[in-house]
Amino acid sequence: MKYRHIKHRSPLVILVLLIFFTTNSFAVNLVIDIRGLQYTKGNAIISLYNSKKSFAKDKEFFKQKILNIRKETKKGLLVVTFKDIPAGTYAIQIIHDTNRNGILDTNLFGAPVEATGYSNNIKERYGIPDFEDAAFTVGNTNKNVVIRVAFSY
């Protein structure tokens, strides 16, 4: 008889725990300010990676957004938000895909002919930067990252 009141509280406890573990306390927004877009044509391909193995590889991103630069930019600045990002280590690659073919175009020597940008503003020298150099940490609060897009030549 004395356990009767515990049985009635257990659904309440389960509900409170469920609300606690399903809120966005473990997932935050990642806001990316993209600067240096020289042209108002084409798309910006913003790829978010969460591992060294997949970094800057086509179709192996954690999340990706493709935005029309003409419609989305304000005075050369493009702001992109990835929502519900769990805590962890990430790196970002941005491609200014001027011809909208969905890939980073290169010349005969493999050097990019479209502007690129990476988190931590790592410059693309002789190939794609290392994940560790471009990596940053997302914790339990919203994160803001500024990336400058530029041509590598």
Image (tube, rainbow, N blue to C red):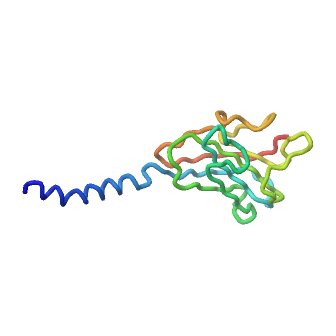
Which quadrant of the structure image shows residue 119? top right
Judge from the rendering whether residue 99 lies leftward or rightward of residue 130; answer left or right.
right
> Which corner quadrant holds the C terminus?
top right
Question: Which residue extends farthest right?
Answer: 108
- Residue 98: x, y in percent? 82, 57
- Residue 37: x, y in percent? 76, 53
Question: Which residue extends farthest bottom?
Answer: 71
Task: Name the residue nearer the viewer: 132 or 143.
Answer: 132
Which quadrant of the structure image shows residue 126? top right
| Residue at the image position 64 percent from the left and 56 percent from the top | 79
Question: Which residue extends farthest left?
Answer: 1
- Residue 105: x, y in percent? 84, 49
Judge from the rendering whether residue 48 lies leftward or rightward of residue 113; answer left or right.
left
- Marks counted in the figure total 0
- Residue 144: x, y in percent? 57, 48
Task: Name the residue nearer the viewer: 60 or 20.
Answer: 60
> Which corner quadrant holds the N terminus?
bottom left
| Residue at the image position 71 percent from the left and 37 percent from the top | 122
| Residue at the image position 38 percent from the left and 52 percent from the top | 21
Which quadrant of the structure image shows residue 16? bottom left
Task: Name the residue nearer the viewer: 50 or 39.
Answer: 50
Judge from the rendering whether residue 127 lies leftward or rightward of residue 62; answer left or right.
right
| Residue at the image position 35 percent from the left and 57 percent from the top | 19
